[in-house]
Image: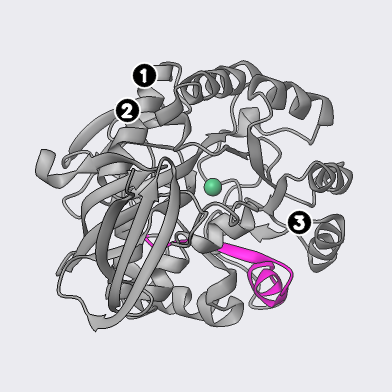
Amino acid sequence: MAPTRYEGRDVRTGRSISVGVKGETIADVRRENRAEPGPWIAPALLDIQLNGFGGYGFNEAETSTESVARVVRSQWRAGIGAFLPTVTTHSRDRMLHSLRAITAARRDPLIGGSIPGIHLEGPHISPLDGPRGAHPLEHVRLPSWDEFLRMQEAAEGGVLLVTLAPELEGAIPFIERLAEAGIVAAIGHTNASAHDLDAAIQAGARLSTHLGNGAHSLLPRHPNYIWEQLSRDELDCSVISDGHHLPASVLKCILRCKGVEHTVLISDAVTHGGLPPGTYPAAAGEVEVAADGRISLAGTPYLAGAGAHLGQSVSNLVRMGVASRQDALRMASLNPARLLARDDRMGALDAGKLASLIQFSWTEEGIRVHRTVVGGQVVFDEGAG
Ligand SMILES: [Zn+2]
């Protein structure tokens, strides 16, 4: 049988590209040196930090197989072909509940094809106001490998990424064990000293999670844990470019320090992301979604998470003039795939890789997705409604 073909403008070259797909795999790629007027084509986006979207979250008492599947479908519409559902600091029972629901949802081949694994953000984070962010203090606790094993068992081995604070008692041997198990250890929600960071890197830590957020609002000018992490070439860095969490100047400086190859865009979007403007009930009190997508604790200036999906984060970064289209897309596809050691299958349009791609236009608002293909299956088609 002849391969199904997807044609468009290669986002890396601006030239014509035709991707032939057989089954779940890219069978061949034809590149021609001519301008192509049609839509752009790029690898599907990969978000390594997503807490929920469209009214459904991964950390709720109500989190279920169906709610996880709903979030997956909402992401397909936006060009996100895969993501790591992010389970955050809570009671052990609640975290196990979330892990089991996500793991059950992954058993559906189509849904599971969009969830390569899980990100555990906490509960081993700084208890301090500022670094702790919105994680509930009562559930913050010291690293426990036994507890991790129980969580990993509930996830059936699906946890691929763990964010923790390396200054906590027991954190360094914990990071060593993560690294030995092939799980990415990330530094975040931390008050680490330079010494703590060096020990974490030595133990195998590889990422700074949402650098510049989950931090004190006031810090010594230097040294502080933001400069220190910026200066460590061993650490890749993830950033939230929703237009609210970090100003363009900070995004630009992080990008120049780390380089395009070592920066990963994340949405860190929450349950209320993508909902129409209004006030909604939430665990931490009422949450207000503004017309521009900003999500805050109602009646306060405090952000209550990110409202933009990863496609909007890519668009924002380009609109702010911080990165080219090509680089912004790379930071949301190839770079996270490489971090997770999935770049043999994901993050690029090459023969032999998984056929996960998007066809889209650049509009004034940014990316408008026409079609999303995951593992050779069309999971979203604008024309099909
Ligand atoms: Zn966080």
Residue 141, position as x, y percentages in the image: 73, 32
Q: Quadrant of residue 304?
A: top left
Q: Which residue is mark 1?
A: 66
Q: Is residue 99 magenta?
A: no
Cβ atoms under marks 2 and 3 closer than 8 Å: no
Left or right: residue 313 versus residue 167 is left
- The numbered dot on residue 205 is 3
Q: Which residues are magenta?
A: 223-244
Cβ atoms under marks 2 and 1 closer than 8 Å: yes
Q: Is residue 297 visible?
A: no
Q: Secondary structure at mark 1?
A: helix
Q: Is residue 194 visible?
A: yes
Q: Give the distance between the C-alpha atoms of the residues marked 2 and 3, in whole angstroms.
A: 33 Å
Left or right: residue 368 versus residue 375 is left
Q: Is residue 237 above or below residue 378?
A: below
Cβ atoms under marks 3 and 1 closer than 8 Å: no
Q: Look at 85% across and 42% down and name the residue there.
A: 177
- The numbered dot on residue 70 is 2
* Among the two numbered marks 3 and 1 on one chain, the one whose residue lies closer to the N terminus: 1
User: In the image shown, does 360 or 349 lie closer to the viewer?
Assistant: 349
The colour scheme is: one colour
Q: Look at 85% across and 65% down and name the residue there.
A: 195
Left or right: residue 3 versus residue 338 is left
Residue 143, position as x, y percentages in the image: 79, 36
User: In the image shown, does 293 or 180 lie closer to the viewer?
Assistant: 180
Q: Amino acid at mark 1?
A: Glu
Q: Secondary structure at mark 3?
A: loop
Q: Is residue 234 magenta?
A: yes
Q: Amino acid at mark 2?
A: Arg
Q: Amino acid at mark 3?
A: Ala
Q: Quadrant of residue 284?
A: top left
Left or right: residue 149 versus residue 89 is right
